[in-house]
Amino acid sequence: MNSNTGQGEPAMRTLRLPAIAALISCAFLCACAQEKEGGGKEEKKRYKIAVIPKGTAHIFWKTVHAGAAKAAKELDVDIIWMGPQNEDDRVQQIQVVQNFISRRVDAIVLAPLDDVALAAPVQTAVQRKIPVVIIDSDLKSTDQSSFVATDNREGGCLGARRLGEVMDGKGKAIMLRYNVGSASTHNREEGFLEEMQAKFPEIELVSTDQYGGVTKESSMQASQNLLTKYGDDIQGIFCPNESSAFGMLRALQNSGYAGKIHFVGFDTSEGLLDGLRKGHVEGLVAQDPFDMGYQGVKTAVDVLQGKEVNKRVPTRLEIVTPENIDSPGIKELINPELDRWLKAESS
């Protein structure tokens, strides 16, 4: 999932710094209250780990949250989950990081929605002895303790191989990009382009420079524009994340091209999986956001305990097709136990 410069100013951007600080203060005090039990006797210190996603609207981030909650339960630590609602609000995400630094959390797990803009806040955290673990999307920095994420370039290659296969290695195709500044989707896009050029030279990519933006609505509009221009001439489409893929799926369905143009997307929301079952999607590159959240918190705890950690922790990556969607391994990947762990955290 992913980032950056939007045209308008979403409502969440009007949230002032004091309001963000108040929200974080409330969350922090709730976490602190869990340190004491019965008779006011203070228990041993529990680590408080801030987990900051790129956004909170998409199911991807709810799944990351559930994985983080599972790790917190198993490792007996507290997580404080907070991030911008929309994935283009870098200003608010920076403010959230800064306020967690001022609150002196023990560690931060961060999915930066901009690989440059979040580097300075991360540097500040580390200078103040608050270790940072980066998840999902890389940061142009060496200050972080570890990077837990999908191999996004390989994910793009998987998408290219699937699209090339269903197109029988020939024809014309387009790729709708996600948003400028998002390292994770940029790597997927580049992996897709490199693999298509190397493995399927007879497939002509007629458009690869259009962006869907951070919402499903903007992606659907960009998709509709592409289909109006190329719909009768192309045989394949690739989209690099959930919002761009879902927007494209809706545009295909609305314009009558669904099931007629080969379509491969990225991520596995309920709507995209429904499209796969209907034959409107022929492949979905599936990440493991649950494990990403889990490994992010686990790695942060390891750092706090003085254990050696790997600088790069890869998470699972699969291609989901109509042929394997009901296999046990894929079912477990695309249907994690969200309610169980999110309810456990709130109880």
Image (spheres, rainbow, N blue to C red):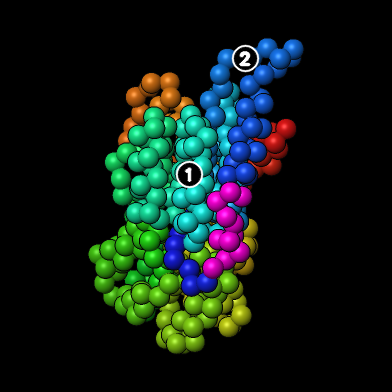
Q: Amino acid at mark 2?
A: Glu
Tell me the residue at 42%/32% (across/down). 130
Tell me the residue at 32%/62% (across/down). 190
Residue 9 lies, with reference to residue 183, above or below; the image says below
Give the CA distance from mark 1 to mark 2: 27 Å
Question: Range of the magenta residues?
Answer: 9-19
**Disc 2, SS:** loop
**Residue matched to label 2:** 43
Q: Locate residue 303: give its quadrant.
A: top left
Q: Which mark is residue 97?
A: 1
Give percent across and percent down for residue 178: 44, 66
Main secondary structure along the magenta-highlighted residues: helix
**Which one is earlier in the sequence, the residue at label 1 or at label 2?**
2
Q: Amino acid at mark 1?
A: Val
Q: Locate residue 238: give its quadrant.
A: bottom left
Count the labels in the image: 2
Give percent across and percent down for residue 230: 43, 85
Q: Locate residue 183: give its quadrant.
A: bottom left
Give percent across and percent down for residue 44: 58, 14
Tell me the residue at 46%/47% (across/down). 111
Q: Nearer the viewer, residue 122 or 99?
A: 99
